Image: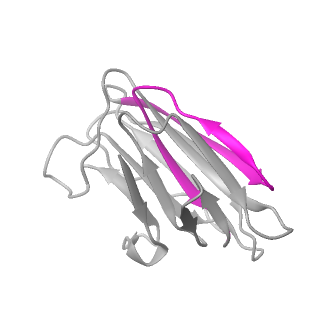
Amino acid sequence: MRLLLRANAHRVEPSGETEIAASPDTHGRERWQWDVRLAPDTREPLTRPAPDEALGASGELKLSDGGVLQVMVRSSPHAAVPSVEIHQVGARSELKRQPQEIMVLLSGGPGLLVEGRHQLGRLDALILEGDDPFSVPLEAEGADSTPLAVIRLKGRTALGWVP
């Protein structure tokens, strides 16, 4: 499954953090599994409550316009192991995704083409899960590279997500 989330669809929390995606996406609906958020680099990320002792990972995303954001991912230790990678996508590259892994691609600038058909702008996100794709071609349009945060949630068992 692929889900494209445009930057204007992300939820800004009262804490000032921006929620990119979460499972479940409605608080209290089901048992909490994971969330992906952004915070300004100017302060420490806030502590957010979670039902279990959460696993976490973060990375600094330097945006193409010069801004800097902290990309933060947490997960229930029973659901997944989170990680964050920061890449500079040039002319052409490719990412691999494993079975039982949810991958969130978060663009740090405009002009990122994913799979030759999904055009990501600044802070747009593409979430990949399920059977396809396991190989994800990327291409930055223009002469400059595009910053990209790659958030991986490696499931302890079959990890799915229905928004």
- For the record, the magenta segment spans 80-109
Is 135 left, or right, of 162 in this rendering?
Answer: right
Q: Residue furthest left?
A: 29
Q: Estimate the x, y position of residue 60 in percent, counting from the top left.
A: 69, 55
Q: Estimate the x, y position of residue 98 in percent, counting from the top left.
A: 50, 27
Position of residue 32 relative to residue 10, above or below, is above
Q: Residue furthest top?
A: 157
Is 107 left, or right, of 128 in this rendering?
Answer: right
Q: Which quarter of the picture shows residue 80?
A: top left
Q: Main secondary structure of the magenta part?
A: strand
Number of marks in the rendered image: 0
Asked which colour scheme the image uses, the reply is one colour
Q: Residue furthest front?
A: 116
Q: Is residue 81 magenta?
A: yes
Q: Estimate the x, y position of residue 132 in percent, counting from the top left.
A: 42, 37
Residue at image point 40% right, 70% down: 10
Depth check, front residue: 132 or 146: 132
Depth check, front residue: 75 or 140: 140
Is 47 left, or right, of 25 in this rendering?
Answer: right
Depth check, front residue: 111 or 84: 111
Position of residue 46 relative to residue 129, above or below, is below
Position of residue 154 relative to residue 129, above or below, is above
Q: Estimate the x, y position of residue 161 in percent, counting from the top left.
A: 29, 43
Residue at image point 37% right, 33% down: 131
Residue at image point 66% right, 55% down: 148
Q: In the picture, which quadrant includes the C terminus? A: bottom left
Q: Is residue 113 magenta?
A: no
- Can residue 85 be spotted in the picture? yes
Residue at image point 15% right, 52% down: 28
- Can residue 60 be spotted in the picture? no
